[in-house]
Amino acid sequence: MVDTVSYRPKAGEIPTQPGVYRFRDAAARVLYVGKAKNLRARLSNYFAPLPSLHERTRRMVLSASSVEWTVVGTEFEALQLEFTWIKEFNPPFNVQFKDDKSYPYLAITLGEPVPRVLVTRNKNLKDARYFGPYTKVWAIRETVDLMLKAFPMRSCSDATYKRAEQTGRPCLLGDIGKCAAPCVGRVTKEEHKSIALDFASFMAGNDSKYLGDLGKSMKTAAAAQDYEGAAKFRDRIVALETALSKSAIVLGDDVDADIFGIAHDELAAAVQQFMVRGGRIRGVRGWVVDKELDVELGELVETVLQNAYEDGSVPPRQVVVPELPADSRELELWLTGVRGGQAQGGGAQGEGAQGGRAPGKVTLRVAQRGDLAALAQTVGTNARNALVLYKTRRSGDFVARSQALADIQEALGMDDAPLRMECYDVSHLSGTNIVASMVVFEDGLPRKDQYRRFSIPESTDDTESIYQTLSRRLAHLSDDTPTSEEDGAPRKFAYRPNLLIVDGGQPQVSAAARALRDAGITGIQLCGIAKRLEEIWLPDSDYPVILPRNSDALFLFQRIRDEAHRFAITYQRQRRARDVTSILAEIPGLGPARVRELLRHFGSVTQLRAARPDAIAEVKGIGPAIADAVFERLRD
């Protein structure tokens, strides 16, 4: 096997300045775009000996037939050029964004002589100010309906407005007070535009100012015995307070920030963006990212921010992320440029354009403490939930499942699709409480009623544990074993699997293959999935099977492996808790109720074992003497 690829340039040919590089295939298609502070140092990583490369990096390098680079003056210019080329060429090995849906916005067309407020997904309205995005259309329509009571501006179509001008009769909204009716001259166009500007300023976060001004106006009108006018001001205050109640108050009134949460695994990442303006959550957006190559969180943050603000959205002065990328300073410069350019050009969405504030520098940070950190944690939780939901929905797609099974059949060289797959994993704590799990997927879906757990009394290592587990399972499998229920009673192992999967690489697969040979079982395909590189290993194979990073087949492998791991860990924890409960029950004066209180108070066996006697004595019903006895007993 050659050490590296034939198109590797000589080290002296590659400059040491900052720049952007592109890998191309034989058809000149761009496969991957990257940037570097030092092109020579960065590219040398790709041309290291092939066996030392990450498996997916090796696949990209082998798929390419040439590499080219462009030198730029600064790291900031490299960031800009990389972003431009990724959008232009859409390279298959760069991060791929899955979210193709357009979100609804609230828009105010301030460029028109008679501005209009509308709900739209079109981000190209001339001289319009945008607010959002919102995740639900009904939520933004409800907000507009409430706001029109306080800011009665036009929301009708151009055709409706022209018809009212011609007939001299306003529409229903004009009659019920939700429009000032400039179409029939109840207010001038200048007065109506002032209402629209107030609406935009309020939505941009200046809500406390308007509520205060309205309160003063109401009191002044009441003092002048203008009770009808005071009632109108009161109704506007109620409408604004109702609209504000729809947005959770999370931070101080002076806080404007975009908060990003990212949850990712080897194959995908889910992103959540919370837009906080004036201390309130004004909009939420979420999308999913496919990862072809392994991307660290910092690098993923950089790509996510470029995607978030590429469509004209204006970043606020503060952007909160889960981790700072290596070139955070250059990213701040880029974000500041986006904020300044869009805020001055008009027609942009975001706090800079909407509130009429000075552009200002954008700061990239990680929230460490306080309310902002708590909100960032909430955003991260939403991202994790979104990732789980994405995986659940993808696995529930019949077409995707069918394609995954067909791809697995082809990749492993099976005669038939693996309609029944069994996956095995081993779990232990420093060699104690060794357990194994067996999970079953049929037609690409879990069959939890057929999951099995194994206790392993003694084992030398994970490979021996795999051998013992498979030997016990295969003992129930022979040619004359019924493959269906008899007399209404289900068999312990109901069906013969098409595919056995073990969590691990070559050593675990070899142990499983030995179990199959010793049991005399043939006709069942065997493979292992190594977690770090997501490689599929077959028995007696020197090289793994590499599935496309975003393929449904690899997704299904990952899901069944993760399910086996979860099931094994859960059983292992139950065993540990049961063992500790048995140990504690031997202590005089410590009954079942106090044992439960101890475990409830500390939350886990690990925390209880690590606790000092004084901390144990703080538990309800546990005195110093019992605390000392618990501490000493758990140290044995």
Image: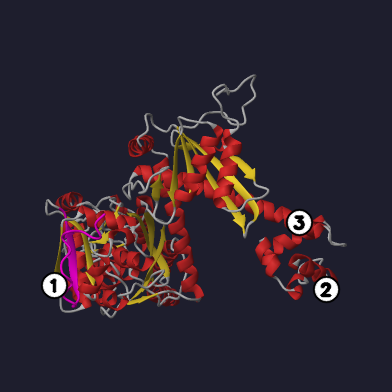
Say which element carries label 3.
helix
Rendered residue at 68%/61% (across/down) = 605
Rendered residue at 58%/24% (across/down) = 481
Q: Can you say which quadrant of the picture contains the N terminus?
A: bottom left
Say which element carries label 1.
helix
- The residue where tag 2 is placed is 624
Could you tell me the amino acid type at mark 2?
A: Pro
- The residue where tag 1 is placed is 13
Q: Quadrant of residue 394?
A: top left
Q: Is residue 138 left or right of residue 36?
A: right
Asked if the residue at tag 1 contacts the one at tag 2, i.e. Cβ–Cβ closer than 8 Å, the answer is no
The numbered mark at residue 257 is none
Q: Which residues are magenta?
A: 1-25
Say which element carries label 2.
helix
Rendered residue at 25%/64% (across/down) = 46
Q: In the rendered view, would you say 436 is above or below 183? A: above
Q: Is residue 283 left or right of residue 36?
A: right
Determine if the magenta segment contains residue 6: yes
Could you tell me the amino acid type at mark 1?
A: Glu
The numbered mark at residue 581 is 3
Which of pointers 1 and 3 lies earlier in the amino acid sequence? Answer: 1
Can residue 291 be spotted in the picture? no
Crowding at label 1, few (<14), some or many (≥20) Cα neighbours within 10 Å?
few
Q: Position of residue 288 (x, y in %)?
A: 35, 54
